[in-house]
Image (cartoon, rainbow, N blue to C red):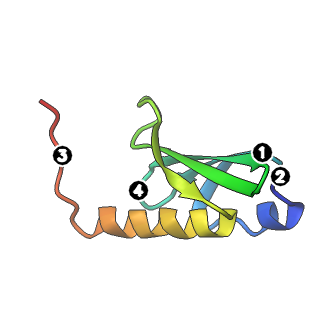
Amino acid sequence: MYTRQELNAIDRSYFEVIIADEYDVTLISRNTRHVWYLRNVELPDGEVTVILHKHQVSDPYHVHGRSRTMKKAIRDIKKHDLFQMNGRKPVYKG
């Protein structure tokens, strides 16, 4: 379960926060406009954050990865944004 402290630590100048509660966080990057869904899953050996991602609001989510903390998940999202903004080559499905 995400703590109030973790939820309050979300950088609202970097992200538009759509929802943020104990188990679900939905963010939109102000840099790339990508949508991120973080889901807190409680497991017997601890918690894990599942990171889902989509490029546009109308797209379906795809799994981006997992993290043991929300802080690390957000760090991973910011790294992904940097990769996108520094000239990622388009991927064409065909």
Placement of the C terminus among the 4 image quadrants? top left
Q: Amino acid at mark 3?
A: Val
Q: Point out the tag, 2 or 3, that comes first from the N-terminus.
A: 2
Q: Are marks 1 and 2 in contact (CB under 8 Å)?
A: yes
Q: Point out the tag, 1 or 2, that comes first from the N-terminus.
A: 2
Local packing at callout 1 (Cα closer than 10 Å; few below 14, some 14-19, many 20+) is some
What residue is pinned by disc 2?
Answer: 1
- Tell me which residue sits at (17%, 57%) in the image: 89
Local packing at callout 4 (Cα closer than 10 Å; few below 14, some 14-19, many 20+) is some
What residue is pinned by disc 3?
Answer: 91
Residue 51 percent across, percent down from the top left: 55, 50
Residue 20 percent across, percent down from the top left: 76, 48
Q: Amino acid at mark 1?
A: Tyr
Q: Point out the tag, 1 or 4, that comes first from the N-terminus.
A: 1
Classify residue 55 by image quadrant. top left
Residue 77 percent across, percent down from the top left: 50, 62
Local packing at callout 2 (Cα closer than 10 Å; few below 14, some 14-19, many 20+) is some
The span from disc 4 to disc 2 (Cα, nearest Å) is: 28 Å
Task: Please identify, in this view, whether the residue under mark 4 or under mark 3 is nearer the observer.
Answer: 3
